[in-house]
């Protein structure tokens, strides 16, 4: 196994063992104890969520944070909730996933040339991480940017994930001012020669998908654009 791949998986073990944010750890454990009635027979994961995908990926997908009864239950990012259903259908139809749904960590799903992570690795109350929780989690994203040696495109799902990506790129040593970059669905930012292309998308939350702010064709176009970037097309 390549050293960078081994280090990437070792990093995920560090994520799972993380205790940097007491508020989030307490909340995730409480949700795992109380459960939702529909999932009373589940043993909730209840720990920080590791990233998932192809360690040789050229595409990095960055979400906001795990869902309390989604990834915090199943132990796999964007798995077991409607946001994940929406996202994986699109990834399947654009060739980045082996199947169109993600129900559990052992359902056989594989990602092709894609790696999925989050700005914050623990489910936050009200889906709203605090600023210090973003900061506490950022080193994990910075390290992933270093270890994904083939990285060429980043898709940021939502404004907060977009900002987290810019902050992580800055912390990795890129001379950028995050406030100078604007967020809009489908907006593409070329950061410079040899650097990944950063593409914005609305987050596939129910708030966006049920209101029609984000539709499957809209998200599909984002990932088709990412694929064109990977293939070197204009």
Image: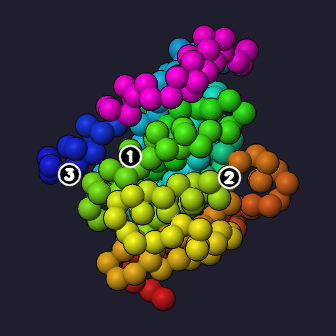
Q: Position of residue 222 (x, y in %)?
A: 59, 69
- The answer to whether residue 166 is above or below residue 138 is below
Q: Which residue is mark 3?
A: 4
Observer-side mark, 1 or 3, equals 1
Count of numbered circles in the view? 3
- Point out the tag, 3 or 2, that comes first from the N-terminus: 3
Q: Which residue is mark 1?
A: 139
Which of the 4 quarters of the picture holds residue 159? Answer: bottom right
Which of the 4 quarters of the picture holds residue 14? Answer: top left
Q: Residue at x 25, y 37 (%)?
A: 10
- The answer to whether residue 1 is above or below residue 17 is below
Q: Mark 1 and mark 2 in contact (Cβ < 8 Å)?
A: no
Q: CA distance from mark 1 to mark 3?
A: 16 Å
Q: Residue at x 38, y 46 (%)?
A: 139
Observer-side mark, 2 or 1, equals 1
Secondary structure beneath label 1 = helix
Q: Which residue is mark 2?
A: 204
- The answer to whether residue 182 is above or below residue 110 is below
- 134 or 233: nearer the viewer: 134
Left/right placement of residue 66 relative to residue 208 reads left
Do we see residue 107 in this rendering? no
- 134 or 184: nearer the viewer: 134
Q: CA distance from mark 2 to mark 1?
A: 25 Å
Q: Main secondary structure of the magenta part?
A: helix
Which residues make up the magenta segment?
13-38
Q: CA distance from mark 3 to mark 2?
A: 30 Å
Q: Residue at x 41, y 37 (%)?
A: 50
- Point out the tag, 2 or 1, that comes first from the N-terminus: 1
């Amino acid at each position: 196994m390549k050293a960078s791949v081994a280090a990437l998986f070792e990093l995920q073990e560090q994520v799972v063992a993380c205790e940097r944010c007491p508020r989030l750890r307490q909340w995730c454990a409480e949700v795992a104890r109380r459960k939702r009635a529909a999932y009373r027979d589940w043993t909730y994961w209840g720990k920080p969520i590791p990233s998932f995908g192809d360690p040789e990926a050229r595409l990095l997908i960055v979400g906001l944070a795990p869902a309390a009864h989604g990834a915090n239950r199943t132990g796999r990012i964007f798995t077991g909730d409607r946001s994940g259903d929406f996202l994986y259908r699109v990834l399947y139809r654009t060739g980045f996933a082996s199947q169109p749904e993600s129900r559990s960590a052992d359902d056989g799903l594989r990602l092709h040339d894609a790696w999925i992570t989050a700005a914050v690795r623990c489910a936050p109350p009200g889906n709203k991480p605090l600023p210090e929780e973003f900061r506490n989690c950022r080193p994990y994203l910075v390290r992933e940017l270093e270890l994904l040696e083939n990285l060429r495109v980043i898709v940021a799902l939502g404004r907060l994930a977009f900002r987290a990506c810019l902050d992580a790129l800055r912390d990795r040593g890129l001379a950028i001012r995050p406030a100078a970059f604007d967020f809009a669905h489908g907006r593409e930012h070329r950061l410079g020669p040899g650097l990944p292309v950063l593409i914005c998308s609305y987050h596939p939350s129910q708030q966006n998908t049920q209101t029609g702010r984000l539709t499957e064709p809209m998200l599909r176009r984002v990932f088709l654009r990412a694929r064109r970037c990977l293939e070197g097309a204009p």
